[in-house]
Amino acid sequence: MWENYAAVLPANGWNWIAVWRRNYLAWKKAALVSILGNLADPMIYLFGLGTGLGFMVGRVEGMSYIAFLATGMVAASAMTASTFEIIYAAFARMRDQRSWEAILYTKMTLGDIVLGEVVWAATKALLAGTAIAVVAAILGYAVWSSILHIVPVIALTGIAFASLAMVVAALAPSYDYFIFYQTLILTPMLFLSGAVYPVTQLPGNVQQMATFLPLAHSIDLIRPAMFGRPAADVIFHLGILFIFGVLPFFVSTALLRRRLMS
Amino acid sequence: MTAIAISLIDVTKTYLDRTVVDRFSFAVKKGECFGLLGPNGAGKSTIARMAVGMTPPDAGKITVLGAPVPAQARLARASIGVVPQFDDLDQAFTVRENLLVFGRYFNMSTRQIEAVIPSLLEFARLESKADARVAGLSGGMKRRLMLARALINDPQLLILDEPTTGLDPHARHLIWERLRSLLARGKTILLTTHFMEEAERLCDRLCVLEEGQKIAEGRPQGLIDEQIGCQVIEINGGNPQELRALIKTCAQRIEVSGETLFCYSSAPEQVRVQLRERTDLRLLQRPPNLEDVFLRLTGREMKD
């Protein structure tokens, strides 16, 4: 049993790049549309909510509301970009197009494929999150130099949510099941993690829940950085994101082995 | 180096409570074309999947190109090309890009892949389609591209799961011709099929399967001679029971399948004499084939 599981783990540290490059080649063909699509949604939220609510809310944690919201949107858009890449695009490649099966007949292992897809999803998260941070910096809502600091955090956020989504994709019989993940897990996480308002607005026991949510840790790192303030507990937050990236990766690989290779 | 490319010993595979492959053994020699012949659901695809390590067996031992499978399947797969039954080409890409992307899964560099692409395109007769999208190719072209793709790593062994199912006769003949050219180059082929004609034309040796079990093994002509060894008259129309009584004295054996009566006889002209009054019948006399072997061994036709 363990021997069979070991055989599907990533074969080495570089095989996944072939899978990543396949996705990059496909993406390149429609890159402009993809970037605009990824950016449009968070931007509309940012300006819609930021300006509209901003008038009523005033200042939050010493910043204008739109600047506060922008920091949340960076993390949230990384979460969405990464998740959607896995539950729609990678799921289609795995199930409908049988691409993974074709790859499994080569030198790649299942773990190589999963890793390539996860890193690719994180790449898209990186693009989406960084784009918003850049727009925020251009508009003066964020400190330019902070972008260098938040890039690794956005990437790690992307890895964590791609890994989690991979578990969901491994278990889902069809696309219909993804709506549960979106509405019951991701949307509440957006509110509980302080993306749109500070978690201190929530009752104490609800605030406690944020400790278990990867998005909260991502925001705790990104927000102070973008405001040009020192972040607290950096290692702790990075550690939690790292665990969310690694554990679900191994779980999803085991689940996918059962699904595809039994 | 051993002369055996694939060996399965007492391999069993069970899904829930259904045994799909039941203590199955066979060995494919290097350089030969070995066929797994059987109706849909006989376990052919499961055996093909087990041989590349895609599915672990519940019991038994599998060795492919010297490597134990599934434990070392990745090692074996470096020298295997697989053509699966269903189209899994990358629809997002052109013909050339499909080959490029696939070569990388074998750790080939872009330069190495680009060096072999022209000969693969020529092999697949797709030179003029190099930059065409895969979605616009005909069924035969797609299958030839899948075959070319399986050759990108210059494999010693090819595993083909129903390579011509769903193709028109012209496309099928072209695939057969391409496969023969690969055998001439010394490649080993394991082929699953439910086409008798395909098995007879291509396979040096084959196994006939039914419900996960081997029911016969040998050279196609050898099996036919051994199991049938006489002419066949297919009789259509009329009441099979009544006809059976009429011709049984001049037939070695009679099988009824559907509306057709199969009469196996070394004296076919006598059968014709017996039936000369029956103008309502359609008679077809032909040499025996693997279909007859299957019918003889299982009591039913293999046709789906």
Image: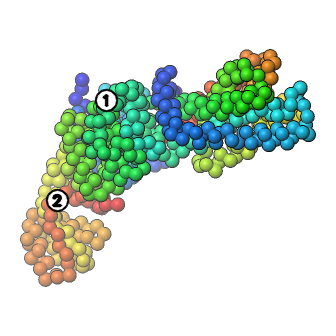
Quarter in which the C terminus of chain B is drawn: bottom left
Q: Where is residue A158 in the image (x, y as percent from the top left)?
A: 65, 30
Residue A227 as seen in the image, left or right of residue A157: right
Confirm whether residue B207 shows in the render.
no
> Of residues B72 and B90, which is closer to you in this image?
B90
The residue type indicated by label 2 comes to Pro
- Residue occupied by mark 2: B288
Q: Mark 1 lies on which chain?
A: B
Residue A261 as seen in the image, left or right of residue A86: left
Q: What element carries label 1?
A: helix
Q: Position of residue B67 (x, y in %)?
A: 34, 27
The relative height of residue B299 versus residue A153 in the rendered view (above or below) is below
Confirm whether residue B260 shows in the render.
yes
Q: Which residue is drawn at 68% across and 47% down?
A: A179
> What crowding class fits label 2: few (fewer than 14 Cα within 10 Å), some (14-19), or many (20 or more)?
some
Q: Where is residue A138 in the image (x, y as percent from the top left)?
A: 73, 28
- Tell which tag, 2 or 1, sits nearer the viewer: 1
Q: What element carries label 2?
A: loop
Which coloring applies here?
Answer: rainbow
Q: Which chain carries label 2?
A: B
Q: Residue at x 32, y 51 (%)?
A: B140
Residue B115's tag is 1
Q: Residue at x 32, y 55 (%)?
A: B167
Q: Which residue is drawn at 19% across and 75% down?
A: B282
| CA distance for labels 2 and 1 | 47 Å
The residue type indicated by label 1 comes to Ala
